[in-house]
Image (cartoon, grey):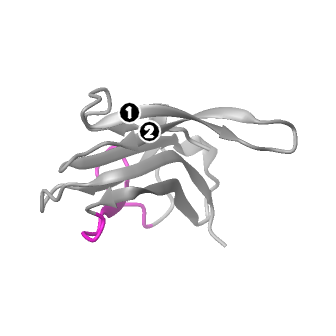
């Protein structure tokens, strides 16, 4: 799992827009504290993650799954967000990547309509083989 501290999030260090919270995750081996990032209020949403391409196997289709929750008082989510998967050279993965690409990026964004959003809690993202 990739955790929110590894993401690039627009205005992530400004508490007017994002705050860090600790939540308890129950598990059979004992409760664990994890950090999550909660959206306070933004109209320019960009969440950017990266993964080294060496962690992926050639010929396997992958999916990026974001682990998120919306708070009860959330708003602004009727306008869809965009999800993009790209390499540093700007190309979208259609075939096996070449040797020059070292990492793959995934981005959630919404800033064309400048629609205010609130209440998204990000736990992390998982890149896994698609079933």
Residue interval drawn in magenta: 77-94
**Residue 46 within the magenta-colored segment of the rendering:** no
Q: Residues within 10 Å of mark 1 (few under 14, many from 20)?
A: some
**Dot 2: element:** strand
Q: Would you name the residue on which mark 1 appears?
A: 19
For marks 1 and 2 on the same chain, the one whose residue lies earlier in the sequence? 1
Q: Is residue 110 left or right of residue 2?
A: left
Which residue is the extreme one toward the left? Answer: 113
Across and down, in percent, residue 95 comes to: 47, 65
Q: Residue at x 25, y 45 (%)?
A: 41
Which residue is the extreme one toward the front? Answer: 73
* Quarter of the figure that contains the C terminus: bottom right
Q: Would you name the residue on which mark 2 appears?
A: 37
For this rendering, which residue is in front, 106 or 1? Answer: 1
| Residue 37 visible to an observer of this rendering | yes
Task: Kindly report the distance in space between the C-alpha atoms of the residues bearing marks 1 and 2.
Answer: 6 Å
**Dot 1: element:** strand
Q: Are marks 1 and 2 in contact (CB under 8 Å)?
A: yes
Q: Residue at x 49, y 56 (%)?
A: 69
Q: Residue at x 39, y 52 (%)?
A: 120
User: Please, is residue 26 above or below residue 12 in the view?
Assistant: below
Number of callouts in the render? 2
User: Please, is residue 84 above or below residue 122 in the view?
Assistant: below
User: Please, is residue 130 above or below residue 103 in the view?
Assistant: below
């Amino acid at each position: 799992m990739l955790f929110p501290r590894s993401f690039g999030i627009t205005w992530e260090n400004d508490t007017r827009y994002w705050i860090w919270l600790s939540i308890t995750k129950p598990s059979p081996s004992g409760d664990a504290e994890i950090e999550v990032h909660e959206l306070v209020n933004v109209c320019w949403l960009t969440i950017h993650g990266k993964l080294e391409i060496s962690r992926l196997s050639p010929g396997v289709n992958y999916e990026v799954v974001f682990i998120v929750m919306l708070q009860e008082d959330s708003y602004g989510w009727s306008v869809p967000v965009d999800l993009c998967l790209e390499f540093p050279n700007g190309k979208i993965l259609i075939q096996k990547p070449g040797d020059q690409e070292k990492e793959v990026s995934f981005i959630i964004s919404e800033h064309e309509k400048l629609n205010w959003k609130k209440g998204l809690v990000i736990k992390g993202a998982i890149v896994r083989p698609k079933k």
